[in-house]
Image (spheres, grey):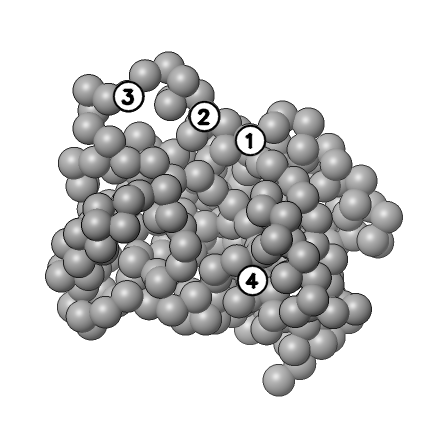
Amino acid sequence: MARFNDKRVLITGGTSGMGLAGARRIVSEGGEVIVTGLNEARIREARRLLGAKGQAIANDAAIATAAVALAEIAQVAGGLDGLWLNAGHAALGAPEEVDAHAFDRIMAANVRGPVLQLAALSPHLNAGASVVVTSSSSTYEGAAATGLYAATKGALVAMARSWATALAPRGIRVNVVVPGPIDTNFRHFLPDEAKRGFEQFVIGQVPLGRAGTPDEAAAVALFLLSDDASYVTGSQYAVDGGLVMQ
């Protein structure tokens, strides 16, 4: 397959997990890719894995000026045919544990970040480009400890629908991928025992009985980024083993 021949895609949060899995497939299918991350070791490893067709840069979506830096990179590169807004910050806690600092931190990374990124990068999206936004099945699960995180991911769904309408006159599609429990390092902030318990609880509700792989989630995102989904916009695609059964 060569779905991404002569195409350039930017993936935020693309130095690990499903973002990196998608970046590697884009390169293998003839495309160029720019990925962002925060961990210097993962950035270096992504550069090694992606080779000459890839760039890996440090960029923090929670910093207000970071989107401008991405726009400059996109302009120098010659524009984008695909944009996957995948970077995010996760946090768990009871409603009583939420304070202003926790609220501001997660909103900055998960809501303000993608909003500013889309705003800054929109002028550099080529006609017919595709935008994919990563939400989460947490939006629909109603789990007691994920209220704040779920709210940020629900906000992305709402914004993506509006973006799909706003960008449609330019032939630009906007869709959402809704991952369930994917086997990545996304819950690295939890102690090992808590992480195992949380994952077992969630996976216990998945009809397919297992976590998904980064490649399985990336495959759906790449479908939406590719011309295979040329008549798909404003949609949500759950990659959750049937967890939310929408």
- Quadrant for the N terminus, please: bottom right
The location of residue 111, given as percent across then percent down, is 48, 32
Between discs 4 and 2, the one toward the N terminus: 4
> Which residue is under mark 3?
98
The location of residue 39, given as percent across then percent down, is 58, 47
Q: Are marks 1 and 2 in contact (CB under 8 Å)?
A: yes
The answer to whether residue 62 is left or right of residue 138 is: right
Crowding at dot 3, Cα within 10 Å, few <14 / some 14-19 / many 20+, comes out as few
Q: Quadrant of residue 8?
A: bottom right
In the displayed structure, 153 sits above or below 219; it is: above
Along the viewing direction, whichever of 159 and 139 lies nearer the viewer:
139
Along the viewing direction, whichever of 228 and 195 lies nearer the viewer:
195
Crowding at dot 2, Cα within 10 Å, few <14 / some 14-19 / many 20+, comes out as some
Between discs 3 and 4, the one toward the N terminus: 4
> Which residue is under mark 1?
62
Q: Residue at x 19, y 20 (%)?
A: 96
Q: Residue at x 65, y 78 (%)?
A: 28
* Res. 164 visible in picture: no
Provide the secondary structure element on which disc 3 rests. loop
Q: Quadrant of residue 54?
A: bottom right
CA gap between label 1 and label 3 equals: 18 Å
> Which residue is under mark 2?
105
CA gap between label 1 and label 4 equals: 20 Å
CA gap between label 1 and label 2 equals: 7 Å
Amino acid marked by disc 2? Arg
Amino acid marked by disc 1? Ala
> Which residue is under mark 4?
20
The location of residue 195, given as percent across then percent down, is 26, 50
Q: Are marks 3 and 4 in contact (CB under 8 Å)?
A: no
Between discs 3 and 2, the one toward the N terminus: 3
* Res. 30 visible in picture: yes
